[in-house]
Image: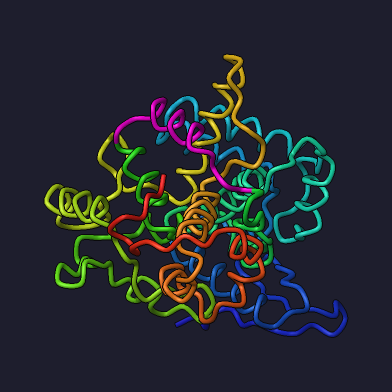
Amino acid sequence: MARPPKLNFTPSLKQYTVTIDKQLHRLGTDQADAERQYRFLLTKADLSEPVSTSPTFGEVADAWLEHVSLTMDKERFRLCKGRINEFISYLGRDIRVKDMRPAHVEGWIASRPNLRSPGTRRLYKAMILAALNWGASNKVRMIAANPLRGRIELPEGQSRGGEAVWPQEVFDLVVAESNARYVDFLRALAWTGARPSTIRKIEAKHYNAHLKVWDTEEIYRGRVSRKKIVKRIWLNPDMVRMAERLNKEWPEGPIFRSVNGKPFPADSNYLVLFKLKERLKREGRPLPDGITLYGLRHSFATNFIVQYPDKIEYLREMLGHRDTAMILKHYGHLIDQHKAMHGVLKDFRPL
């Protein structure tokens, strides 16, 4: 029985290597990355697939765009194709995926001075990551791993406080121009102050009917970082009614879904808003700069402080912060401007 190829450190090449089917593969100097590529190559060899560890980004991008064209709507494909082709024009088609670095993506973003809002910059970066994640997925296996995974800063929520607050008339316009499924998602963000990435994963099993909350700690199970982990999301009466309605409709899996009844893929909600903003701009009805989904969280916090300046500890609990330092840093200027005291959630009027 033939022995499996062995991972070696080759002094003359000053890097790890493996020879499979008489072909030498150079795996770099990082041992952990070399071992990951080594396992990847062995799997492909066992499956009698062509063994290559260094496709170009252009090759991966072309395959991903074909996948998007077959699985997504035409408008999303158009947006993805446009952004990917812009990145390839900036970077070149022939760079190997294994040679890609965060500086390539950051340089591309910096070369586009018109990308002012954090939400737009996030969308552009997310498309590059999506192509690489797809290429590294178990179903595809074009690349051993996404070399940018966890190394790209996605500017979700970097715009704070008043800079990202949605005026009521803007929220009303977006709701009027969106389908009913997306409106549910938008209202859930506006009525809870929760992060979009959390709301997207809410299921019927998370609903605590006794306390009228979503118990969400399970969503973060297995996560190494303890930052931005929310144990529960408090629901006002309107949100309770929506949650109970959606729980009946979708007893299994995420309750917030697209018009075709499928759970929202990661970042698709941002793309929906992006497409809407582009359409309204063409129609001469542009939304204000800085309007992002994450801004609905800031809108919730701002409106809450305006109405209940003495209930900061309640807001801390609702937003899932460990202390009030973050709230005071970004919204403290509102506390001294308003002295009215009302009920907490029963009479609180979010968007």
The residue depicted at 57 percent of the width and 14 percent of the height is: 283
Image height check: is 158 above or below 313?
A: above
Q: Magenta stretch: residue 277 in it?
A: no
- Rendering quarter of residue 26: bottom right
The residue depicted at 45 percent of the width and 31 percent of the height is: 174
Q: Where is residue 57 in the image (x, y as percent from the top left)?
A: 69, 47
The N terminus lies in quadrant: bottom left
Q: Which of 283 and 142 is in front in this view?
A: 283
Q: What's the coloring here?
A: rainbow
Q: Which of 289 and 311 is in front in this view?
A: 311
Q: Which of 261 and 157 is in front in this view?
A: 157
The C terminus lies in quadrant: top left
Image height check: is 102 above or below 168?
A: below
The residue depicted at 55 percent of the width and 49 percent of the height is: 295
Q: Position of residue 346 (x, y in %)?
A: 28, 58
Q: Where is residue 39 in the image (x, y as percent from the top left)?
A: 54, 74
Image height check: is 26 above or below 191?
A: below
Horizontal side of 78 relative to 114 (left or right) equals: left
Horizontal side of 87 relative to 173 (left or right) equals: right
Q: What stretch is highlighted in magenta?
A: 164-180
Residue furthest top as drawn: 283
Q: Nearer the viewer, residue 288 or 185?
A: 288
- Rendering quarter of residue 158: bottom right
The residue depicted at 59 percent of the width and 30 percent of the height is: 287
